[in-house]
Amino acid sequence: MTPSAAESPAELIITGCTVLVHDDQEAVGFMEDAAIVVRDGTVAEVTSAQAVRGRAARERIDGRGQVALPGLINCHTHAPMVALRGLAEDLPTEEWFNDVVWPVESNLTEKDVELGARLACAEMIRGGVTCFADHYFAMDAVARVVAECGMRALLGEAFFSSQGPRGRERSAEFALRHRGAAGGRITTALAPHAPYTVDDPDLAATAELAREHGLPVHLHAAENRAQTDTSLARHGVTPIEVLARTGVLDTDVLIAHGTGILDRDLPVLARASGRTAVATAPRGYLKFAWPTTTPVRALREAGIPVGLATDGAASNNSLDVWESMALTSIVQKSTEGDPRWLTSRQALHHATLQSARAVGLGDSVGSIAPGRRADIVLVDLTGPHTQPVHDLAATLVHSARSADVRTTIVDGRVLMRDRELLTIDVPSVVGELEERLPALVDRGHGRRIQEYDT
């Protein structure tokens, strides 16, 4: 007699942990001495540890002393740029682009991109990131890495107007070719670089392609106040208003950074007919000494989700979303002059459900609940730096670190167990990348892929 689905062994059971849960108002809470049952890559139950005692499972994880969180989402990065980590330090934005990064990127090969992406995915898995939104070049290589390592990703092939129509066409071809790949773990977007490198006709054509094919758009806009001021001086409109007049805001759009968003932009964003979100990566803004940060409070009041991000490691030096969560909370308190704003529970909300919405996955990830994909991380809070625990949310945001992540799971598959990566061989990646670095970082040719002029 064939056992019923209810009687058959679960794919995975995690027991004895504390689970971060959301109530029907999306408030963050915690369920202690809990268990998570996973079937077919999906959370089937969140119940008590007692309720699953003796329940059959193909794999079990003892979660005692650990907190189960929805996998973190890096809402905007350039994963292959880990190969440039530390190469362009202590420079203002225009010199960072023109003198180092864009000359070096003219050397990129698909193999460089692949190795950088592989190293980046290893770093993110170890830091509890289960999904990332990537915006870069040679993205076929990144898609292969994502498929192989088991992560989830929103991928877009970046383009500039200086590449001519073919740049936009390649971005669309990539998005259509890889949409739904890796068993549905890969989603795709059109990826114009920014309003200052992609002209209005190209943005309008991109918006038309997005509507035609049901694709989102992922781009940089109003990255800093200087870009907004320059746009106003040259064109009489802000970068956000450019997105509105070209129809980009009539699509689903993920805007990177937005530290140059003005008060006049907020009603424009609120009126957008597409799903609009912003990704904030505060560490880079501090390093570049930008005078403003992403206006998270104002965006939240306008109904715009703000997800957490790192940007690329060439500017941020790490892909640590845990750090982004803590910095977002701290920087927002300072910017608003209000220690009560962006509490630890609010920061966790940005790190979970808001980040999931930002990358267009709000219906499938971002919480641990029946029917959601089983993207889960287990965080060990037994270390001296996380004890004692008076406020669990505050401990997670301000005391815990990415190195406290013990286990990372995507779609029910364990990608890291007890800090051991199971899908990426880091030493071989590092060895091969080091051999390629001299050719990659050469700037003697005098080329650059683009000019930063804002």
Image (spheres, grey):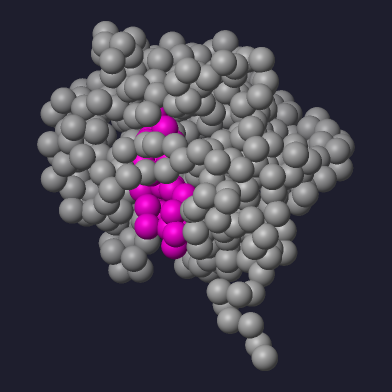
Left or right placement of residue 65 versus residue 154 in this view: right
Q: Residue furthest bottom?
A: 1
Q: Up-down: is 274 above or below 55?
A: above
Q: Up-down: is 108 above or below 318?
A: below
Pick the front one: 119 or 32: 32
Pick the front one: 86 or 65: 65
Left or right placement of residue 231 versus residue 209 in this view: left
Q: Position of residue 124 (x, y in %)?
A: 63, 38
Point out the image quarter for the C terminus: top left
Q: Position of residue 405 (x, y in %)?
A: 64, 34
Q: Up-down: is 415 above or below 411?
A: above
Residue ID at (18%, 48%): 272
Residue ID at (33%, 61%): 210
Point out the image quarter for the N terminus: bottom right
Q: Position of residue 287 (x, y in %)?
A: 50, 14
Q: Position of residue 121 (x, y in %)?
A: 66, 43
| Residue 340 lies within the magenta run | no
Residue ID at (80%, 30%): 438
All told, the count of numbered labels is: 0
Left or right placement of residue 167 versus residue 120 in this view: left
Q: Is residue 441 visible?
A: yes
Q: Is residue 99 visible?
A: no
Q: Quadrant of residue 263?
A: top left
Residue ID at (61%, 35%): 66
Q: Quadrant of residue 122?
A: top right
Magenta stretch, residue numbers: 347-372
| Residue 359 lies within the magenta run | yes
